[in-house]
Amino acid sequence: MRLAAFVTGMCATLAMIVVGCTNFTDGDAAVAEGEAPLYRASVSASIEESAASSSARESERQTSLTVEAVHTSCEALSSSSAEAIGAVNAYVDAFNENAADIERTAGPAVDALNHSADLVAGSISDPLPAELRDALNSWVDAARAVATAIAGNYPTDEFNAAISRLNDSKTTALDRCDAAYR
């Protein structure tokens, strides 16, 4: 019974295909002369509008990515540099006032500087403006240099030069962050 129903269904399907394919449509395959320019203009306008819309969406997406990257990197710098500078200041105070505290404060200062450098370096991404990216990389390099100076017990003049570079790079990077937020 199932087989008979299946065969009947197949025959009906084939008959519909044959009947449907044997019908012809009358008409002329020529293009209406007055309508072709209108059609071309319509297609051209549609393509231009689509391209403009797509370009605007991509521009908005790029702007959004840049804003997000700026916020991420600048927040990483702002939060971690404050802790690092505080630890370095504790080390400098110990160096100037109590030689016994130098060893106790050196490790935390080195760790805080390296942590800040790692955090900021990890936040740097392609959407950042080049000037900001360069300023953040300068902070990373300067923080690592001060950490090396502390860990290596560098002479005072070399340590002070590294600190000066650290302070300058922090100021520049934070100024670039402020400018990028505007």
Image (tube, grey):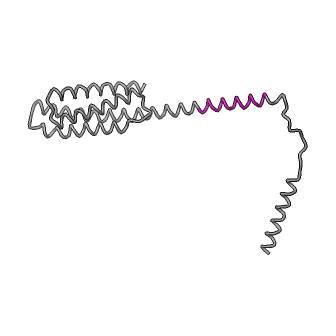
Task: Name the one closer to the observer, 143 or 105.
Answer: 143
Across and down, in percent, residue 26 comes to 91, 43
Q: Main secondary structure of the magenta part?
A: helix
Q: In the rendered image, which quarter is residue 34 located in?
A: top right
Task: Name the one closer to the observer, 94 or 120.
Answer: 120
Task: Using residue 80 as the reference point, say whether residue 96 is left or right of it.
Answer: left
Q: Quadrant of the C terminus?
A: top left
Task: Using residue 90 as the reference point, say whether residue 2 is left or right of it.
Answer: right
- Residue at 16 percent of width and 34 percent of height: 91
Residue lying farthest to the front in this orientation: 30
Across and down, in percent, residue 131 comes to 39, 26
Q: Is residue 142 above or below residue 12?
A: above
Across and down, in percent, residue 170 comes to 29, 28
Q: In the rendered image, which quarter is residue 104 located in?
A: top left
Residue lying farthest to the right in this orientation: 26
Task: Using residue 124 as the reference point, say whether residue 28 is left or right of it.
Answer: right
Q: Is residue 49 located in the magenta-colored stretch of the structure?
A: yes
- Residue at 82 percent of width and 30 percent of height: 35
Q: In the rendered image, which quarter is residue 16 located in?
A: bottom right
Q: Which range of residues does the magenta coloring cover?
A: 37-54
- Residue at 86 percent of width and 38 percent of height: 29
Q: Quadrant of the N terminus?
A: bottom right
Q: Is residue 162 above or below residue 101?
A: above
- Residue at 40 percent of width and 33 percent of height: 71
Across and down, in percent, residue 74 comes to 36, 32
Task: Using residue 78 as the reference point, say whether residue 111 is left or right of it.
Answer: left
